[in-house]
Image (spheres, rainbow, N blue to C red):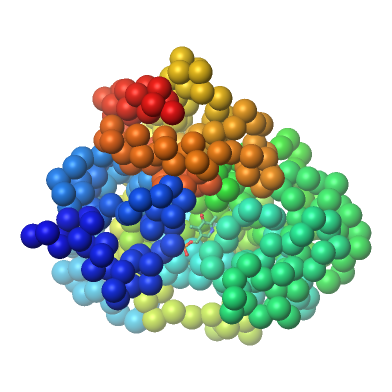
Amino acid sequence: MENSGSQGLFARALQHIPGGVNSPVRAFRGVGGTPIFFREGAGPWLTDVDGNRYVDHVGSWGPLILGHAYPAVVRAVMEAAQRGTSFGAPHAGEVELAELVSRRMPSVEMLRLTSSGTEATLAAVRLARGFTGREALVKFEGCYHGWGDSFLVKAGSGVETLGLPDSPGVPKTLAQLTLTLPYNNLEAAKALFAAEGQRIAAVILEPVVGNMGVLKPSPGFLQGLQSLARAHGALLIFDEVMTGFRLAPGGAQELYGLKPDLTCLGKVIGGGLPVGAYGGRRDVMQHVAPAGPVYQAGTLSGNPLAVAAGLACLKALEEPGAYARLEAVGRALEEGLLAEAKAAGVSVTLNRVGSMWTLFFTPGPVYDYPTAKTASVERFGRFFHAMLEGGVYLPPSQFEAAFASLAMGPDVVAHTLEAARKAFRSL
Ligand SMILES: *Cc1c(COP(=O)(O)O)cnc(C)c1O
């Protein structure tokens, strides 16, 4: 029995799984302590293997916009499983999902399914390179696009700086093809395009950032990038793995009224099962094999269980008022948390777009990587653990987004704010 609680399981995990986890942020390195092992989820609640209950503000890092074990999703997966878990051949669900995504996101004229967000971004960049015949990629400091070689790159200050790999194992020669810019700085982007425009295949970004905590694009920033990319023959790739179907039925691109050339999807599109997708302009997507020469494939791509979960999730989001309710939950959390922080005399900045939010322990404002880094990791860590004690599970890092879900009612918001009141006062 003693080896089946979180502590015991983590000790066992460390013996056979690097760092004891299958994805680094789960290890609690950003907040100290050891990770919690979960037994089950129901709606907005998680129960750990020691029997403690928490309001879940992580939602599996975004997919669980309906909450845990949403009945229609569970039913769809069970029914699909009974018909066979994988065919390795086409099936009707894939067509239905592609049609549904195209309807929601008109920029996505054609779509290819993958099994993760990382696969989608890797494929989109290869496609952009294959389509344009160019090799350089522009990304933004602090944006995360999965763990692909070309994305694990941080440039020093100055747009002339060549990319240096962030991780051992990423070839320097490949990293040099990734040019990094500060987020929300259109002038820097203009200078880079003026100098390097003819070798840039694509610019990729999170249209609303979630991966250095939540940041909003400044007015005109996304439009400016689109104009720059167009003027220089580069493709604009929106990485909507986090924002797609979350911020609006058509994602951030609907919210900001833009049509990127390519879009990467993941998380919500799989309803909690492994799905990713990339899609966009028909003339570009026609370059993907076997329609065209740019190779990309997947044994389990379009997996019937995953597609069934995704379809059930996206259909549930069609319920009238779903996005207004997500906004209302997000706003209630924002207003409540700011009020509790103020009452306790704690200086914070809360960035939120719809159901994505981050509480930064800094006076702010937070609008790019350096300003995000002004937040106190130490204070966040203490707040995080105080919230855990109050039965609230937040993302175990200052630099991640928290996610509201449709399963969160006023009771869950009240529980969260009650825990926050004590947590702020304990700092
Ligand atoms: C989560 C995420 C990814 C990676 O998706 P995985 O499914 O974890 O591979 C890529 N881009 C963004 C913006 C993400 O939030």
Number of numbered discs: 0
Q: In this orientation, does residue 353 appear?
A: no
Depth order, front residue of 44/175: 175
- Left-right relation of 241 to 368: left
Locate residue 64, reporting x and y percent: 35, 48
**Quadrant hosting residue 221:** top right
Q: Looking at the image, is 238 positioned above or below residue 166?
A: above
Picture residue at 22% right of the left edge, 55% below the top: 6
- Left-right relation of 388 to 78: right
Depth order, front residue of 268/159: 159
Picture residue at 20% right of the left edge, 46% below the top: 47
Quarter of the figure with the N terminus:
bottom left
Locate residue 42, reporting x and y percent: 21, 44
Residue furthest to the right: 195
Quarter of the figure with the C terminus:
top left
Locate residue 406, reporting x and y percent: 34, 36
- Left-right relation of 131 to 39: right
Residue furthest to the left: 1
**Quadrant hosting residue 89:** bottom left
Picture residue at 43% right of the left edge, 62% below the top: 24
Q: Looking at the image, is 193 positioned above or below residue 363?
A: below
Q: Looking at the image, is 368 positioned above or below residue 83?
A: above
Residue furthest to the top: 343
Q: In this orientation, does residue 386 appear?
A: yes
Locate residue 300, reporting x and y percent: 37, 76
Depth order, front residue of 375/292: 375
Picture residue at 62% right of the left edge, 28% below the top: 363
Depth order, front residue of 38/424: 424
